[in-house]
Image (tube, grey):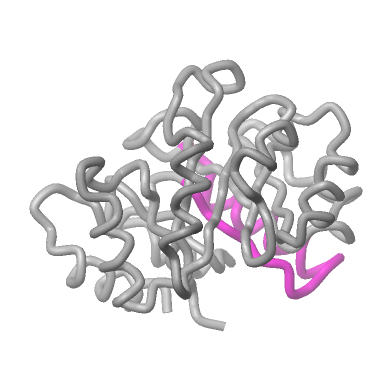
Amino acid sequence: MRGMLSPSLMCADALNLQTELETLESLGVPFIHLDFMDNHFVPNITLDTALIRKVKTVLHGMRRDIHIMAYKPEQYFEPMDIGEGDIVAVHYEACDDLHATVAAVRERGASPFIAISPDTEPEVLKDYLDEIDGVLVMTVYPGFAGRPMVEGSFEKIAAVRSLIDAHRPGLLLEVDGHVSWDFCKTMRERGGDMFVAGSSSIYQKGLDIKEAVARMNELIK
């Protein structure tokens, strides 16, 4: 399986989001990464539920890859119109009953992922691997774009890959955080399948988005 790109909309030109989406779709990009933050689980607010819901109405082939960095994430499923074709990552650290939250994503027809922050050990995933479609590994502390990669992140990606392959081969491993030109190839080699690209790669200032997407696809192939 080729590596897959999921550009982060929070890093795009805020005044031209629909144009950005149309360009990415025309380039065959499979996912668009949508970050939602509640200013409690992380100290920031990004894309709101209304915008995330609206994005669904303008996509034709690209899938929403929704990353909810918020406590009690299930309260946002209806406002975001979570449904078939969506990927929804909820944080292990933010859920009162993770089994129930994962089931609620599945009941809406979406693909549940569990996200883990840098300080969370991969072993916590063992009890959930039969219930999910993928794992999102944060290689930066969540909350803001452009943060440096946390030391040991390559090893953590490899550890999650080993855990998946031992218990549920076929689950997707998504990498989110400083997916840069310098690091993305190693992230792929360590076992990443999906890559959230933002300010350290395809949305770097001055880069042509078409050339940047082509370059990233080559590095994560």
Residue 153 drawn in magenta: yes
Residue sitting at the far bottom: 1
Drawn side of residue 106 relative to residue 189, left or right: right
- Nearer to the camera, 2 or 43: 43
Query: Residue 50, position in %: x, y?
Result: 49, 38
- Nearer to the camera, 112 or 93: 112
Quarter of the image for residue 167 reads bottom right
Q: Which residues are magenta?
A: 150-176
Assign the C terminus to one quadrant of the image: bottom left
Drawn side of residue 71 relative to residue 176, left or right: right
Point 63% across, 58% down: residue: 87
Query: Residue 39, position in %: x, y?
Result: 52, 18
Point 24% across, 52% down: residue: 203
Residue sitting at the far left: 206
Point 60% across, 48% down: residue: 137
Placement of 52 over or under 169, stated as above or below = above
- Nearer to the camera, 96 or 53: 53
Query: Residue 132, position in %: x, y?
Result: 79, 58
Placement of 62 over or under 41, stated as above or below = below
Placement of 145 over or under 52, stated as above or below = above
Assign the N terminus to one quadrant of the image: bottom right
Residue 51 drawn in magenta: no
Point 81% across, 56% down: residue: 106
Query: Residue 58, position in %: x, y?
Result: 41, 61
Drawn side of residue 155 relative to residue 8, left or right: right
Quarter of the image for residue 118 reads top right
Task: Count the labels in the image.
Answer: 0
